[in-house]
Image: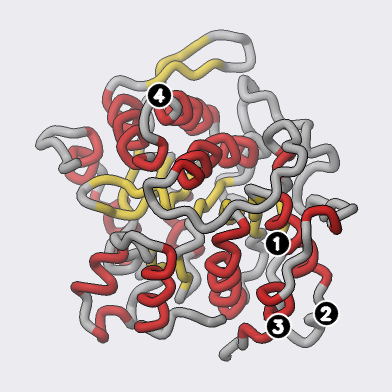
Amino acid sequence: MNCRPNSPLKLLLAAVPVVAIAVACILHSSTSGSRYSSILRDPPSASQNHRRLRLVNLIKDPKTVIPRETQLVQNADTPQFGVLLTCSDGFFDLWLNWLIFFERLKIPDLPVYLFAEDDVTHARCVELQDQSRESEYRADVTCLPWDFVFEKKEGSGSLKAFSYNQMGYKLMMTHRPTVVNRLLEMGRHIIFSDADVVWLKNPLAHIQQVFMNNDPIVHILGQFDKKRICPGFTVYRACPEVIKFIDMWQDDLSKGDPSKNQVPFNNVLDVAMSSGIPVPDHNGNTTVKKITAAFLPNRLFPNGKLYFEEMTDAEREGAMVVHNNWIIGYDEKINRFKDFDLWAL
């Protein structure tokens, strides 16, 4: 999956003005996990969840969205961001670990959306929201139920922690683009983060400066991984071009092995950057537009191989966001987090 010599993503790094590269490269209280112990020990069953956690920071009716042919209105001076994660019951403790590290940063005005892949995850999230934590910082978390995007699954139950190539894992990967688009259609830029990620420092100021730069406009900002973008930590601009790109990614993902979502993502991105993609406007006309993508600085946003195997202790001190990839196995991920003091539960 090496980058071709003349691939659009590689050419971008040479073509983007020096100012944009400079912006992308310059910016580079302990909380106990005990408050989550009841959820980890005794998760509620799906049948006990008789109510829905109200959607926060979204319009009242979650089924009502901005039509994708309508131009999304953005304020270039103060772009609004949200963080999206997807999770099944089997990965819930990874999500909790992410949340603990996130809450330690006390980032204001950055809502978090957790898409629950099953009923038990949604019920656990509801219980987590109901816990009394008056003296502690509390992230603005919205748990999105399955029917926020899809038709309701009756008795969906719990999904275990699937390994990389198991069918359950592959099915989870097919949901990701659709959920991202549902939030983009509401006009908020989305920072997608896998649950096996830890936020050590607040990356928002860095991301905002890149997105506010208009020469060129960056549509997608992603983690560097083998000369390609890793969809496991990616920032998406809320605009028709990106929504159309994600539609195309979803279509390509459904035709192959969904566990290898990075391949169709980058294949479609190559086309979107070089030839452009057809984007409809509010009049029903279609215009071919190109996507601009850029890498996040890999020393600030390292992948698992770089952070855990190659960086020195001094270099790790500068990392903002760490992705625990380049390792297969749920327990293996947790053990590696523990070895590097990145496990809070």
Residue ID for mark 1: 141
Residue ID for mark 3: 35
Residue ID for mark 4: 255
Question: Does the residue at mark 1 contact the one at mark 2 (Cβ under 8 Å)?
Answer: no
Q: Which of marks 3 and 4 precedes in the sequence?
A: 3
Residue positioned 60% across, 40% down in the render: 179
| Whole-number angstrom distance, CA of label 1 to CA of label 4 | 33 Å
Which label sits on residue 132? 2
Horizontal side, residue 333 vs residue 41: left or right: left
Dot 4 alpha-carbon crowd within 10 angstroms: few under 14, some 14 to 19, many 20 or more: few
Q: Amino acid at mark 1?
A: Val
Question: Does the residue at mark 4 contact the one at mark 3 (Cβ under 8 Å)?
Answer: no
Q: Amino acid at mark 2?
A: Ser
Residue 17 x, y percent position in the rendering: 25, 46
- Of badges 3 and 2, nearer the viewer stands 3
- The quadrant in which residue 293 appears is top left
Horizontal side, residue 193 vs residue 261: left or right: right
Q: Which of marks 1 and 3 precedes in the sequence?
A: 3
Q: Which of marks 2 and 3 precedes in the sequence?
A: 3
Residue 53 visible in this rendered orientation of the protein: yes
